[in-house]
Image (spheres, rainbow, N blue to C red):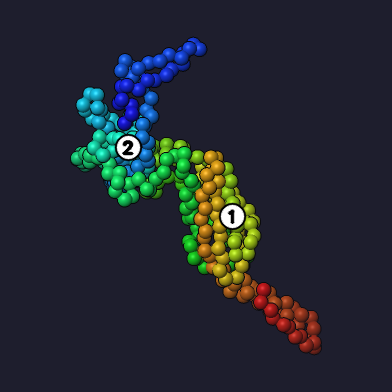
């Protein structure tokens, strides 16, 4: 990766002056900026959920810990230098107790399907919406014609399993903190053209919305806008079954008729029943 190139100059500001250092003299001060940045999906299954990452030091001719992320979550995206991926970067699963060290896997095959196209560079990432409730196509039966939609947003591939160890938990927490904040959540029932009754969301990703439904099919549009003005969008199909609402209405009509009859024993009552 670029930090190991000793020909790259590094600028530092001190006491109002800009000093120019050559990486050849002070390699430890080199800026870790990839010359050819690309985001890679590290899709390797590990019992520890954590990968160790090393990169080939072209100057010292040896493997060294990755200068930016020596440990990463398995199943996460990382920005790498494309010039190092084929044979100068390697990974292995972090060893956990009672387990032996696994061999290193050399090279990230950038041309294999799913390695690169699973991710985008951070500046181009848009919110990925994950609905936790209800499920797509779910039939909603209640007495209110409303449904509570809950979900969260992701901005890259993040491991969804519960961390099994302290290292994985810390990496997951760091990755979550690095996500862009949400600035706006929009929810609308496209089938009846009405906005959500209420919307709540947290800057770090969780959101919920209360949406009105019509009888039968409904198509709910959820849009998330992050602080970089990137837009994420998803549509959620739902079906509202009026059975419970109709039964409640009919029961209310029966009770009203009984009360009327109780007060008018000799009267005759005719009621036209109309669906709500």
Q: Nearer the viewer, residue 125 or 99?
A: 125
Q: Residue at x 61, y 67 (%)?
A: 214
Residue 82, numbered label: 2
Q: Residue at x 27, y 44 (%)?
A: 109
Camera-near label (1 vs 2) is 2
Q: Residue at x 30, y 46 (%)?
A: 111
Q: Residue at x 80, y 87 (%)?
A: 267
Residue 272 x, y percent position in the rendering: 72, 82
Give the quarter of the figure containing the N terminus.
top left
Residue 18 x, y percent position in the rendering: 46, 14
Q: Earlier in the sequence, mark 1 or mark 2?
A: 2
Residue 60 x, y percent position in the rendering: 22, 24
Up the image or down, 24 lies above or below 54; here it is above
- Residue pointed to by mark 1: 187
Name the element at disc 2.
helix
Up the image or down, 44 lies above or below 146; here it is above
């Amino acid at each position: 990766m670029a930090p190991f190139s000793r020909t790259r100059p590094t600028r530092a500001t001190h006491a109002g002056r800009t000093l120019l250092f050559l990486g050849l003299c002070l390699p430890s001060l080199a800026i870790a900026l990839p010359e050819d940045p690309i985001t890679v999906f590290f899709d390797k299954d590990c019992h520890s959920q954590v990968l160790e990452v090393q990169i080939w030091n072209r100057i010292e001719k040896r493997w060294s810990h990755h200068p930016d992320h020596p440990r990463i979550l398995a199943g996460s995206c990382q920005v790498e230098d494309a010039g190092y991926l084929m044979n100068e970067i390697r990974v292995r699963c972090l060893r956990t107790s009672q387990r032996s060290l696994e061999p290193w896997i050399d090279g990230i095959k950038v041309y294999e399907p799913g390695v690169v196209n699973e991710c985008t560079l951070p500046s181009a990432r848009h919110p990925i919406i994950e609905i936790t409730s209800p499920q797509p196509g779910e039939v909603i039966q209640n007495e209110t014609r409303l449904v509570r939609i809950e979900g969260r947003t992701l901005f890259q591939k993040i491991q969804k399993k519960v961390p099994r160890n302290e290292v994985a938990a810390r990496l997951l927490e760091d990755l979550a903190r690095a996500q862009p904040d949400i600035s706006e959540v929009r929810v609308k029932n496209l089938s009846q053209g009405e906005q959500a009754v209420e919307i709540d969301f947290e800057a770090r990703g969780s959101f919920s919305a209360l949406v009105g439904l019509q009888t039968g099919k409904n198509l709910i549009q959820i849009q998330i806008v992050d602080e970089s003005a990137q837009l994420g969008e998803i549509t959620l199909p739902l079906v509202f079954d009026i059975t419970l609402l109709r039964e409640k209405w009919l029961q209310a009509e029966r009770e009203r008729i009984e009360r009327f009859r109780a007060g008018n024993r000799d009267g005759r009552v005719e009621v036209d029943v109309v669906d709500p």
